[in-house]
Structure formats: C-alpha cells, structure tokens
Amino acid sequence: MTRDSSSAESIGVSALGFIAADPELLGRFLAITGIEPAQIRQAATEPGFLAGVLDFVLAHEPTLLAFASSSDLDPAAILKARRTLPNGSDDYDRSI
C-alpha cells in the first residue's frame, strides 16, 4: 500500500466515523446507499466502499465543510483521497 492510498484510506475511515457519529447523517447515508446498519462492517471491506463514503461527503457541501473542519483537512484533500481509493477515479476511456 502506498503512502497516498494509506492516507486516503485513513481519510475514508475518518469520514465513516464522522457519519456514524451523527444520527441524522447516518440515517441519510443508510437511506441513500441502501446498506443496513449491521452490514456496514462487511461493506467496509469491499473495494470502493470508502470511495463511496467520500462520494457521500463530497455530494453535500455542508457535510463536506463540516467533515473537513472537524478533521482539520482542506476539502481538496478529501477529493484527492476519493480519487486515490479503489474505484474512486472518474477516469474513463473516451471515444471520439
């Protein structure tokens, strides 16, 4: 595991903890993802799950700013972490 991916994973885990600590935010996360509370631990082992957690945070600016502030992170660092995680890249083949 590279330093960047380790750091990105740490940010994803922190974001999951941030979400879990807020009952309203957790409820929204569970509703949007369709994951049951008992499935979170298992889902967290799947490739791309932490990128999905960061997608959730990045999709709502107030949530992004609150997480960034509580984690002492620049919001751009959260986006960079999302792109570093497995299945976190928006890169795709483009045809002309």
Image (cartoon, helix red, strand yellow):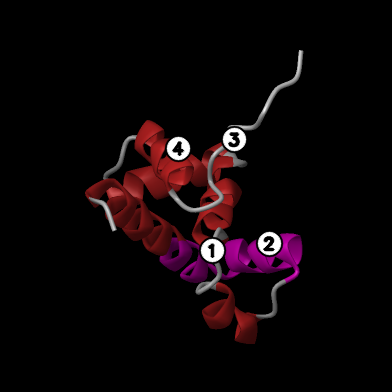
Q: Which residue is more in the foreground, 92 or 15?
A: 92
**Label 3 neighbourhood size at 10 Å, few (<14), some (14-19), many (20+)?**
few
Q: Secondary structure at mark 3?
A: loop
Q: CA distance from mark 1 to mark 4?
A: 17 Å
Residue type at numbered disc 1? Pro
Q: Which residue is mark 3?
A: 90
**Span colored in magenta:** 16-34
Please identify the quadrant where the N terminus is shown: bottom left
Q: Secondary structure at mark 4?
A: helix
Q: Which residue is mark 2?
A: 28
Q: Which residue is more in the foreground, 96 or 80?
A: 96
Q: Main secondary structure of the magenta part?
A: helix
Please identify the quadrant where the C terminus is shown: top right
Q: Where residue 89 is drawn, which disc sits there?
A: none
Residue type at numbered disc 4? Leu
Residue type at numbered disc 3? Asp
Residue type at numbered disc 2? Arg
Front of the two marks 1 and 2? 1
Q: Where residue 79 is drawn, which disc sits there?
A: 4
Q: CA distance from mark 1 to mark 2?
A: 22 Å
Q: Which residue is more in the foreground, 56 or 25?
A: 56
Q: Secondary structure at mark 1?
A: loop
Front of the two marks 4 and 3? 3
User: Between disc 4 and disc 3, whose residue precedes?
Assistant: 4
Residue lying at 42% horizontally and 67% vertically, measured from the top left: 17
Front of the two marks 2 and 4? 4
**Residue, far left:** 3
Q: Which residue is mark 1?
A: 47
Residue lying at 65% horizontally and 62% vertically, measured from the top left: 29
